[in-house]
Amino acid sequence: MVRTMAEGGRELNASAKPWPTAKAEFVLTCRGRQWIPPRTNHRHRGKPIKLYTSGRFTRMPPSQPLPYDPQFTSPEEYIASLLTFTSDPLFQILCGGVHILDFFTRDSDAEPTDLYHEILPTDWISFFSAQEVPSILDYLLRIPIDQFPKTCPQTLVTFITQVRVHSLNRGFTRPPAPAKTKKSAGISHSGEEGALNTGMRPKKIHEVENFSAFVDDLVSNVNARDKPTGGEGITHILDFGSGQAYLSRTLAKKYGHNVVGIESRPGNIEGAKEMDARFENLAKKRERKGRKRQQSGESTSRATNGDSIAAEETAPNTSNNGKSGTLQYIQKCISGNDLTPITTLIPFPTPKSLLLISLHSCGNLLHHGLTSFLTTPSVKACALIGCCYNLLTEKSGATYKPPLRSLHPRLVTTSAVADPDGFPLSHRFTHTRPGVRLNITARMMACQAPGNWTASSSEAFFTRHFFRALLQRIFFDRGLVTGAEPVIIGSLRKKCYSSFGEYVFGAIDKIGWTQRLQVSVDEVARYEELFAPRKKDLSVLWSLMAFCAGVVESLIVVDRWVYLMEGVGKGLLKEAWVEAGFEYGASPRNLVVVGVR
């Protein structure tokens, strides 16, 4: 749930200082207030991903430091409006104030009002009752506001408009590759390119291909500013949470950078080294084949082969001008803000000039990256993409208690956590009164991507949520829970989602409650028959919750940008911005937070 400023945007605007701005050099594309989710070219439902392996995107930063809706004329105007809107009571209820487990446990013979009718205005309910769920999703996500029917309540139109305009634009574009480019530092054949992609699914390939190109462009820009004044430029790239090193390996082998992967799990480092060896073996094999072709006189004919030409043309220009990169790993659990102990483990040169990157930092890891950037002078820039907002902690300690939820152990635990590196990160969001806060339900919802839902996938979501909510009602009626206690079910076999009966007995068996809960097949069938008419209500409410989640993610990302801009105000860095690093349709957590000294 979001608790934000009670003051209006006008008063906030009058007292706040304008954000420092950088010279605009690149114009972002923006889909405007219709908030139409970007169409994608990735492999999704049988369609291939389009990988931008050599497009150059060298002019940074974009013309506006935040990708907000064009109705706003400045970052300050957008932030003030965002803080005001997220204090709306209905928005707070839909983003954190209600959980799917509450849906069938609040009404009884003595209390006939169910959650759906308790939360939503009556005119919204009347409108939704005349629409099919896919049409409701279209109204929320796709249909332009000026094409809404006259029967749509004006309050609903206003709410949908507000959610759309306060959700950051996620559109991504990259210019096409030039006709001729140099070969990259480490890649000269498509076989090695394939070796880099080994172990990655299409989604990961899309992320790594595009973000590595983005990072290489950022290095070029930093070097172009730094070297004319006698600076060293970027000497090393630090990859926070490098995992299996897909991104690190691409930057080192394909773009020729010196990369240091920082990873806390030794198993991931060992796996990364095995993949490094696999890549090197393939490169050596290719080299041997090349020498044999030359010796046998095949080199001339191979030079005119279309595949070889294509491999050369699609290889990117690199900021290291063809130099070979290095790759090393440091096992370190990142929990503090001082990177000096890590930088001392990096070999020459000295002094070092670092770029800090991370692709999908979970929870507070991105916060550690941002604070490390500001407190470590040798880090000249950062480019960080976060994810797993549900793993964020709270700085304030006591989170806002959802008005429609009974207190249970999970909320007690999260509300008692006070982490100085938690959310919010910025001084402004921290010291706003009342403070900006998110509970775990709101943060979990921020991980949703309704813009990528299809008719079949959304129906599958709704069915699973219906089964889980109805199982909670059975637990409630049998006295096993008193409300919305989080009985963790987790994933079940595919067969368990074929019917409610299969789900109930599969879930009971998994959590070991076969003795505690003895229920017959007929009883399960009666529950399903009784509550089946309300499945649509649950689907509508879940759709509204997921729709609002884009604003919650925007709030988290904007807080991180504000934190960097506070550093700009203190003279710790020159500029900061946020932009999309790859396609939302391929990977919805696509916003890069960038800072440059």
Image (cartoon, rainbow, N blue to C red):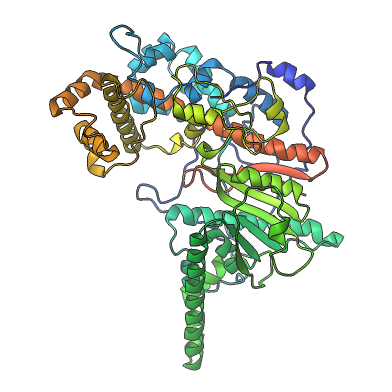
Q: Is residue 495 or residue 200 the one in the foreground? A: 495
Q: Name the side, left or right, on which 2 lies relative to 499.
A: right
Q: Name the side, left or right, on which 48 lies relative to 578.
A: left
Please say if 523 is above or below 281: above
The residue furthest right is: 229
Residue 268 position in % (x across, y down)? 50, 60
For the point 24% across and 30% down, the residue is: 516
Q: Quadrant of residue 486?
A: top left
For the point 62% across and 71% down, the residue is: 185
Q: Note whether residue 66 is visible.
A: no
Residue 135 position in % (x across, y down)? 37, 26
For the point 45% across and 28% down, the residue is: 409
Residue 98 position in % (x across, y down)? 44, 22
The residue furthest front is: 515
The residue furthest top is: 110
For the point 37% across and 12% down, the residue is: 126
Please say if 51 is above or below 374: below
Residue 578 position in % (x across, y down)? 65, 42
Q: Is residue 15 or residue 210 the one in the foreground? A: 15
Q: Is residue 178 or residue 289 the one in the foreground? A: 289
Q: Quadrant of residue 318?
A: bottom right
Q: Name the side, left or right, on which 587 lies relative to 322.
A: left
Please say if 238 is above or below 277: above
Q: Note whether residue 533 is visible.
A: yes
Please say if 508 is above or below 287: above
Q: Name the side, left or right, on which 226 lies relative to 478.
A: right
